[in-house]
Amino acid sequence: MTFFKQNVRFFSVAFGGFFLCSTGSVLAENLYGAIAYSLEERIHGYATNFSSRDAAESEALANCLARLDSEDSSCSVELWFKNGYGALAEGDDGFGTGHGRYEQDAQLMALENCNNYTENCDISVTIGTD
């Protein structure tokens, strides 16, 4: 057995079978984000880099609710995503959300979805996971 093979075998056993790739990267954990929105007040809240979908949605909802002016208004989670980007677009009478691996993909989807319901849509927020 060569020196390299012996060291790889030792490294593999010593570290539970994990092997670093030539790029030096290890398996990344899944990170989640979410956007909550209030159509009545046109307020949003968001969360990013959470280890679960539920945690991201809860934080986004809490952030949105904290920004409301009226107790009669409400927020709802409109988008969640994993390991990528999320965007919110607002127009005259509505909104749209989008997600994607890249920021531009999320923004384009949000604009397309918004334009299906209303006019004069613009991106309000874009967030992404690390």
Image (cartoon, grey):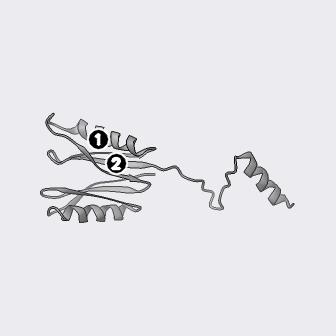
Q: CA distance from mark 2 to mark 1?
A: 9 Å
**Rendered position, 49 above or below 4:** above
| Residue 8 spot, x, y in % from top left | 76, 56
Location of residue 41 (image quadrant): top left
Work out which residue is located at the far front of the displayed protein and give it: 54
Q: Is residue 51 left or right of residue 100?
A: right
| Residue 28 spot, x, y in % from top left | 54, 52
Q: Mark 2 or mark 1: which comes first in sequence? A: 2
- Residue at coordinates 20% horizontally, 56% vertically from top-left? 95
- Residue at coordinates 43% horizontally, 44% vertically from top-left? 52
Which mark is on residue 14? none
Which mark is on residue 34? 2
Work out which residue is located at the far top of the displayed protein and give it: 71
In which quadrant of the rendered image does the N terminus lie? Answer: bottom right
Work out which residue is located at the far right of the displayed protein and give it: 1
Q: Is residue 60 left or right of residue 11?
A: left
Secondary element type, mark 1: helix
The reply to whether callout 2 and callout 1 are in contact (CB within 8 Å) is yes
- Residue at coordinates 40% horizontally, 46% vertically from top-left? 53
Question: Which residue in the structure is indicated by mark 1?
Answer: 61
Secondary element type, mark 2: strand
**Rendered position, 122 above or below 45:** below
| Residue 45 spot, x, y in % from top left | 28, 44
Amino acid found under the numbered disc labelled 2? Ala
Total count of labels: 2
Amino acid found under the numbered disc labelled 1? Leu
**Rendered position, 52 above or below 116:** above
Near mark 2 (Cα within 10 A), the count class, few <14, some 14-19 or many ≥20, is many
| Residue 27 spot, x, y in % from top left | 57, 53
